[in-house]
Structures are given as C-alpha cells and as structure tokens.
Image: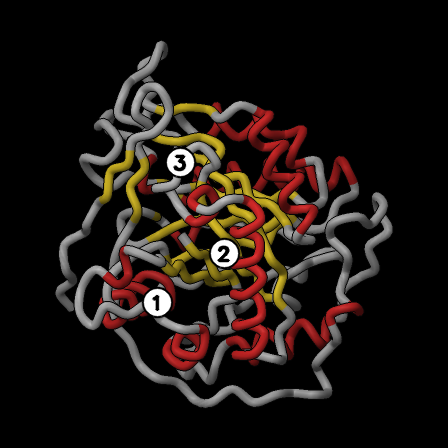
C-alpha cells in the first residue's frame, strides 16, 4: 500500500530554538465488539499501587488473569500475531495489561510541543482527568492509569556547544512534572530525542529518576540521527540493539531497587524507524510498547498502525492522538476512544495525547 508522505512540524523553543517535530500517518478495519469479561475483571483498587508501594512488596501477578487480558486485547485477531507468543510473564506490580495508560505529552517550556505544556497546570490536569473518564467509559473492563509523558531531552535546530543538536532539560523541570503527576496520581515517562548524541549517553543521566517506582521511559527513533543529519530534515532510526540496551538498563534498575516493571515506549510511524524488530529481547522487568506516533486523518493513521505496529509484533501497542495535527485535513476529526477501540487489532494499551 502506498502511504502519504511524512509530514514534519518543526518547533523551536528555549534560547536556541529547540526543535521538535510531531509525527504522521495511517489506514484501517473495524473489529468485533468488545465484551466485558466479568470473571477476569478486577476493580481499580485491587490493582498494584505503582506510586507508593514499598520496595520489594509487590505480589506476583495473576497469570490466568494476565493471559485472559492479553487475549481480550488481541481484539479477535486471527493472524496469529496477537497475543504475541513466548513473551515472559512480568514480575509483580506490572501495570500492563491490567490498566490502560492514558498520557499527556509535551514539555513545560513550550506550548507548541504538546498538551502537557500548552495549558496551565491545573487546567491541563483537569483535561487529563476528562480523557481518563472517556477511556474508562469506552472500555469499562480496563481501568485507566493517567500519565505525564515529558520530553526530557529535546532535539533542536542548533548544534549547541558539543554539536549534538539536543538540549537536556534541567532536573528542576523533571521535579516539577513529578509534583504535577502526584496531584493526578499519575505515572511519569521521561522521553529522549537523542539527535546526534546516542541513547547510551543520554539514558544513564536519568537513573536517579528511573529508580523511582512511578517513573518510566520513552525513546524516539524519529530524532536518532545515526547518519549525522540534522534532526528534522529526515526521519531517524533505532535498531533492535539500541532498544535492547535500554531494556537491559531498565531491567537492571528494577532488579537493583526492587521495583515493579518499567514501561518502555518506542515511538514509530515508518518501517525504517525500527530495524530488526525480531531481535528485540523482552524481560520480566520491562514492558515494551510500540507506540503508533503518526498524525493525520483517521484512514492514514489506521494504515500506519496496521502495517508498522500490527504486522511487526513485539509485546504491547500504543496509539497517539494529536489535538491539532489530526484535524488539519478532511474530515478534520480526531478519533474518539470508541473509534480507536473499534478500528484496531490489538487494542492499544497505551494512549498518548499531544
């Protein structure tokens, strides 16, 4: 199938014009109706408290419930790809697939990089609460875990002192996001756009935050410029080796500190953004989500999900919704929770709003 060309939106913030481009794409089919499985359902207060539970006190997961939820989230898939076979059971305290994560994405320095920084904090948290309610209504079987997805390393248009074309956010801003997240009982994702740096150099900088049970991680291939190109001029890439480095690193932190599993988000909207996906290694300590990070009209987004997420299964899937970019072209409509759940196999278990 022929896809529409990738559209970038370059945004410049901070003193040097920080660059961030939102993504694009897709096409799709409707799937069977979702049915509630009361025998498998657990109420929200029975789920692990991933924000405040003491070290090493997470009970083992219910494997029968876990398997039933994987089957439910496959959404009637008949290809044999979903649920993904031979994946490890997570250690105790796992969020997925017991809850669906609904996240607001952005940076506090910029109103143009996502909803997280676009609105005043209290207004933003109120809007997040509204979206959580909408997803709960669309899928009552799956409790919703709110999240703030903060861009901690931002690709930019200026090389900076070291020529790496990325800006590392001050830790005080991460601290501010943690405070906001606590108010909403939300988890936090720290997202990295490495530009001409690399993930091995950037990830360890955040270890003190990743040692916290509520902090998770995101990596963005779009801005991983392995060929030395400036970010924004072409789409970057990560290989399975890069993803395995991050996954191994996160697994080590989980083991060291007795934490529940970390969620690792890998953004994707083209085939070349993630190479050698079959070589990606999974760990009981890390839950890996391939997030469909493309923007555009509904049919375009559906095609991207089908070809680059559904057909290259890793573990869990995510879906990104853009308040502004998704409505730029006809039919000028951003998909609703009900529409997302009716269109996609498997059901995305991570939802991100920008």
Residue beneath disc 3: 110
Does the CB distance between marks 1 and 2 fall below 8 Å? no
Quick check: 20 left or right of 80?
left
Front-most of 76 and 188?
188
Q: Residue at x 35, y 71 (%)?
A: 335
Left or right, 352 with respect to 216, comes to left
Q: Secondary structure at mark 1?
A: loop
Residue 270 seen from this side: no
Say which element carries label 2: strand
Viewer-nearest of labels 3 and 2?
A: 3
Circle 2 packing at 10 Å, graded few (<14), some (14-19), many (20+), is many
**Residue 258, how many percent across, how many down?**
79, 42
Q: Nearer the viewer, mark 1 or mark 2?
A: 2
Tell me the CA gap for discs 3 and 2. Answer: 26 Å
Q: Give the CA distance from mark 1 to mark 2.
A: 14 Å
Dot 3: what SS?
A: loop
Q: Mark 1 or mark 3, which is nearer to you?
A: 3
Q: CA distance from mark 1 to mark 3?
A: 35 Å
Q: Looking at the image, which is closer to me, 151 or 107?
A: 107
Task: Tell me the residue that label 1 is attached to.
Answer: 311
Mark 1 or mark 2: which comes first in sequence?
2
Left of 51 or right of it: where is 233? Answer: left
Image position of 21 (left or right of 201): left
Whichever of labels 3 and 2 marks the residue nearer the N terminus, that label is: 3
Q: Give the labeled residue for mark 2.
A: 289
Who's the residue at 39% across and 85% down the image? 31
**Vertical order, 81 against 326 (above or below):** below
How far from the left and from the top, in percent, is residue 91? 73, 56
How far from the left and from the top, in percent, is residue 196?
32, 25
């Amino acid at each position: 199938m022929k896809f529409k060309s990738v559209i970038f939106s370059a945004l410049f913030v901070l003193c040097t014009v920080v660059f961030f481009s939102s993504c694009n794409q897709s096409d799709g089919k409707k799937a069977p109706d979702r049915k509630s499985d009361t025998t498998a359902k657990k109420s929200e207060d029975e789920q692990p408290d991933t924000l405040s539970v003491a070290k090493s006190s997470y009970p083992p997961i219910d494997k029968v419930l876990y398997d039933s939820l994987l089957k439910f989230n496959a959404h009637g898939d008949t290809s044999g790809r979903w649920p993904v076979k031979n994946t490890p059971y997570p250690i105790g305290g796992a969020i997925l697939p017991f809850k669906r994560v609904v996240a607001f994405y952005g940076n506090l320095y910029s109103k143009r990089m996502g909803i997280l920084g676009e609105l005043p904090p209290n207004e933003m948290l109120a809007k997040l609460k509204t979206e959580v309610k909408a997803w709960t209504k669309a899928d009552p079987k799956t409790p919703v875990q709110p999240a703030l997805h903060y861009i901690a390393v931002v690709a930019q248009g200026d090389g900076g002192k070291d020529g790496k074309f990325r800006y590392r956010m001050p830790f005080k801003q991460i601290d501010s996001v943690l405070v906001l997240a606590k108010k909403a009982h939300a988890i936090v994702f720290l997202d990295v756009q490495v530009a001409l740096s690399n993930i091995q150099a950037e990830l360890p900088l955040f270890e003190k935050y990743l040692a916290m049970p509520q902090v998770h991680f995101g990596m963005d291939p779009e801005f991983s410029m392995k060929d030395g190109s400036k970010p924004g001029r072409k789409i970057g890439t990560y290989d399975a080796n890069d993803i395995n480095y991050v996954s191994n690193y996160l697994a080590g932190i989980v083991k060291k500190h007795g934490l529940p599993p970390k969620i690792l988000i890998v953004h994707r909207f083209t085939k070349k953004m993630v190479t050698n996906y079959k070589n990606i290694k999974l760990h009981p300590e890390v839950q890996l989500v391939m997030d469909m990070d493309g923007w555009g009209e509904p049919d375009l987004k559906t095609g991207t999900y089908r070809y680059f997420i559904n057909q290259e299964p890793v573990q869990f899937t995510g879906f990104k919704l853009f308040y502004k970019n998704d409505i730029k072209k006809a039919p000028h409509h951003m998909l609703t929770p009900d529409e997302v759940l009716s269109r996609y196999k498997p059901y995305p278990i991570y939802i991100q709003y920008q």
